[in-house]
Image (cartoon, grey):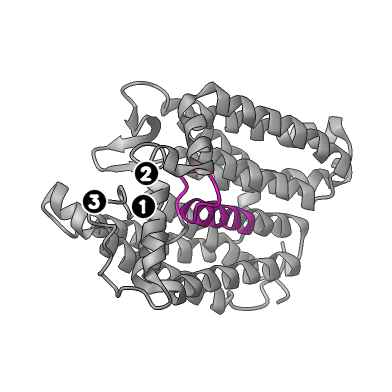
């Protein structure tokens, strides 16, 4: 095991806590009207977000002090537990269904989303596999096929819920890790063609996914139906202008943009804080990604490097998809904005992942 050389990356801690603070403020601002209407409590959502933020921050600082090398020994067991949870969530009476997806396990308003946690479990396991088998990664039989088999199994189980957004983030993260490990470009081209065909089949197999594609191309074709969210999101971003309407002054949160505290929170942020506020948040994400890349490059061993690459890729993909959806550059899919969107499982998972990254930074040459 490498010897500790320094304190954790202080700048990464500051950026993470700043994003979390902005997120808590925006969750309240975006959700207060809806929460007061539905639960007669304008603090309903932000209180729950504060609870999970507290749990997540505590987990982040705890994991920051757990040698990342230990995750290598537990990676297989953690992955098995996550697979068991993915099976349990599909069983009626155990899994909870919301908005047409059976993705949660829990009681009442407090529940967890196993598909969120398998993302980090898969990163830890794949980092272990790639660090041990990197010399075979250019081969199909011993490298690429074994590394992707579990990934596609997890993706298939997530799609049974169904949850295309989370599955896409996990799949994209693992593909980046395998590419960084040195897989052959030709193999990726072939897999890419197969993947495109697979995504087309997934879209055609569910009418609502096809509706999202058509609404993405022309949301005004069905402004009261499939195009409604994109249109309302753009109506929020547009009036924000350079400086915004002011914190708490959003108009779209008044029952126009459905549940604005979740996937479309960036639209409300842009409406209230304008281009300046939106740019500030994006710069914070860019700074977080830069620190993550530095940590990955400076990690003392392959396992730490692959683990850091996986974590930072997961964050980057999720940010790009969410911002792309909110700004109308990508079809609507259920992806939260890390550290900002309301959602206990997503927030806790992201903070835990940053904890792992911070521990790697204690060994890295920055």
Mark 1 and mark 2 residues within 8 Å of each other at the beta carbon: yes
Which x, y percent locates residue 141? 85, 30
Between 354 and 205, the residue placed more toward the observer is: 205
Dot 3 or dot 2: first in sequence order is 2
Regarding mark 3 in the picture, which secondary structure is present there?
loop
Q: Residues within 10 Å of mark 2 (few under 14, many from 20)?
A: some
Q: Which residues are magenta?
A: 312-336
Q: Main secondary structure of the magenta part?
A: helix
Based on the picture, tell me whether residue 323 belongs to the magenta stretch: yes
188 on left or right of 88? right
Mark 3 and mark 1 residues within 8 Å of each other at the beta carbon: no
Looking at the rendered image, the disc whose residue lies closer to the viewer, 3 or 2, is 2
Looking at the rendered image, the disc whose residue lies closer to the viewer, 3 or 1, is 1
Q: Residues within 10 Å of mark 3 (few under 14, many from 20)?
A: few
Q: What residue sits 84% from the left and 37% below the top?
A: 187
Between 48 and 198, the residue placed more toward the observer is: 198
Residue carrying label 3: 255
Based on the picture, tell me whether residue 149 belongs to the magenta stretch: no
Mark seen at residue 228: 2
Count every numbered label the image shows and give the total: 3
Residue carrying label 1: 232
Q: What residue sits 50% from the left and 25% below the top?
A: 160
Q: What residue sits 83% from the left and 46% below the top?
A: 134
């Amino acid at each position: 095991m490498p010897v500790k050389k320094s304190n954790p990356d202080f700048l990464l801690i500051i950026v993470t806590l700043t994003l979390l603070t902005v997120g808590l403020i925006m969750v309240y601002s975006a959700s207060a009207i809806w929460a007061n209407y539905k639960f007669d409590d304008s603090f309903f959502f932000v209180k729950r977000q504060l609870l999970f933020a507290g749990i997540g921050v505590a987990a982040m600082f705890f994991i920051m002090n757990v040698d990342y090398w230990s995750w290598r020994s537990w990676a297989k067991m953690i992955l098995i537990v996550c697979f068991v949870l993915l099976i349990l969530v599909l069983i009626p009476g155990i899994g909870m269904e919301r908005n047409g997806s059976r993705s949660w396990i829990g009681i009442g308003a407090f529940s967890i989303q196993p598909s969120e946690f398998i993302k980090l479990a898969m990163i830890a396991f794949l980092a272990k596999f790639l660090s041990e088998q990197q010399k075979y990664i250019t081969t199909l039989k011993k490298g690429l096929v074994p590394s992707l088999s579990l990934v596609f199994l997890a993706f298939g189980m997530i799609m049974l819920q169904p949850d295309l957004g989370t599955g896409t983030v996990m799949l994209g993260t693992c593909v980046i890790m395998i590419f960084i490990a040195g897989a052959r470009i030709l193999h990726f081209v072939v897999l890419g063609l197969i993947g495109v065909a697979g995504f087309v089949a997934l879209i055609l197999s569910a009418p609502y996914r096809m509706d999202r594609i058509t609404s993405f191309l022309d949301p005004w074709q069905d402004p009261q139906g499939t195009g409604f969210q994109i249109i309302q999101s753009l109506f929020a971003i547009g009036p924000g202008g350079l400086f915004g309407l002011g914190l708490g002054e959003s108009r779209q949160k008044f029952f126009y943009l459905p549940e604005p505290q979740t996937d479309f929170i960036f639209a409300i942020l842009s409406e209230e804080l304008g281009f300046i506020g939106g740019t500030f948040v994006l710069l914070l994400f860019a700074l977080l990604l830069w620190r993550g890349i530095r940590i990955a490059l400076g990690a003392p061993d392959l396992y730490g490097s692959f683990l850091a690459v996986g974590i930072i890729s997961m964050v980057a993909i999720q940010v790009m998809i969410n911002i792309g959806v909110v700004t109308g550059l990508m079809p609507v899919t259920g992806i939260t904005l890390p550290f900002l969107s309301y959602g206990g499982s997503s927030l806790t998972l992201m903070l835990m992942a940053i904890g792992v990254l911070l521990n790697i930074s204690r060994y890295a040459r920055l």
